[in-house]
Amino acid sequence: MERRRWALPTITLSIVLIAAACGSGGGTAAPPGGSGASAGTGASPAGEKVTFRLTTWAGEDEAKELQELVLDKINAEATDFEIVHEPAPADYYTKLQTTIAGGTGADFMWLSQEYVAGYASRGALLDLTAHLAAVDNPAAKLDGYFPDVIKPAKYQDKVYGLPWIAQPVILYYNPKLFDAAGIDPPDDTWDWAKFRETAVELTKDDQYGFTANGWPPIQQFIWQAGGEVITDDLSSSPIDSPEAMEAVEFYKSLVWNEECCPTEETITEQGFGEMFKAGKVAMFMGGAADTFDGLDVVGATVVPKGPENRANLSYVAVTAVNSATKNPELAAKALAALTDGIHHWKIVAPRPELATAEVILASIPEKWKAQKEGQVDAIVAATEEMRAFNVIPRHQEWDGLFWSEFQDPVFHDKSAPAEAAPTAREKLEGLLP
């Protein structure tokens, strides 16, 4: 399985206290033959472009696409700025923290949704609220984004970046395994009960109906049951609510349960996505951009409906601006151009006007068009009920506690959900703002 256009860094770190005056993030006029990487005055001589530095976690292939499909076009059209890409695929967040603290951070940086509030609360990011309002570019118009997707780009009602992707979770399935079993494939009428019942029915010998190992996140199922893990006002973590308990019990009936899913040991030995690709798993929940080597046809539909709704997790990533950039107004203009360019490259764009079958198909590389064509309707439908996390400044700590104090003991039968939840909730709420 190839996960294109969804690079998800998972490093947990603590961000050092950063003062806005700690140094320049760039945004300087590029000297002849230079990159403009050193601190500058913020003004460029007449006729010279201001150079902005962009750091991302993009690997070699993704960086090449970003350069050729987005940056080259922007740099050719812009008369007052250019963007230089500095990919850092290994230890991304560690390097990012170090460069920002040392005053050498890039002007623009990619951040997964869980990180924006933390960086913003420590003064590392530029408040873009007023700057974006003055930019004439559709990507700068906040009301043009999915409402739940723009949320992680904000902190205390101020905007600190622009989302460049909003990738919903959908249900992939292997049509051959359904045909062989004489079972109709999943569709948008399925609920939790039908889903689990069919997963059990498809499980035999070395074949499983579904696979679950903590992915998709349990939060998705809690949302579907009408529960929450961090409330909208960020004041509580009601993981012990009846709705949350219903969802956890359902998810626990899937994870590593050989009635319907491979064990933890089997997944470790054979690979989570690889088992689906090898035809050993009938159904798999993945991101909208996932592609699968070796499978000619992969079916897709929306995820099964829970007791209350069909919410699915949207992977959201944001391009934020270093608070130390020397050209904030021009940086906002460049950010909007960069974001709009990425919206026509990545799937799915976080703007409803671009989250269409036509735009999605145009963004898919020729190599994967045949496989993804039949999945586009499911992707578009999933965007209607996707949602992002409610994010707090100490989100990485919260995530770590949620796993160690709740998910891990519950999944490994060390504690019953109803026993673990109240104690875990108290600890989690100690991290809320």
Image: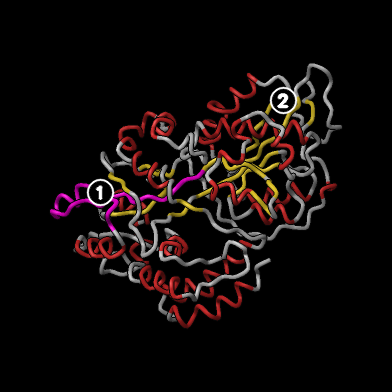
Name the residue at 25% across, 60% down.
208
**Quadrant of the frame with the C terminus:** bottom right
Q: In this view, does 216 lie above or below 265?
A: above
Find out whether residue 186 is within the magenta segment. yes
The x and y percentages for residue 210 are 30, 59
Name the residue at 48% across, 34% down.
354
Say what secondary structure mark 2 lies in: strand
Residue 81 has which mark? 2
Q: Which residue position holds label 1?
A: 174
The x and y percentages for residue 98 are 73, 50
Name the residue at 37% across, 56% down.
272
For the residues labelled 1 and 2, the Cα–Cα distance comes to 48 Å
The image quadrant that residue 223 belongs to is bottom left
Q: Which of marks 1 and 2 is nearer the N terminus?
A: 2
The x and y percentages for residue 293 are 33, 41
Identify which residue, 216 or 36, lies in the foreground: 216
Tell whether 32 sits left or right of 115: right
Identify which residue, 343 or 111, lies in the foreground: 343
User: Are the two marked residues, 1 and 2, in contact with CB atoms closer than 8 angstroms?
Assistant: no
Tell whether 263 sits left or right of 218: left
Identify which residue, 35 or 209, lies in the foreground: 209
Amino acid identity at mark 1: Asn
The magenta segment: 166-190
Name the residue at 63% across, 54% down.
115
The x and y percentages for residue 310 are 39, 56
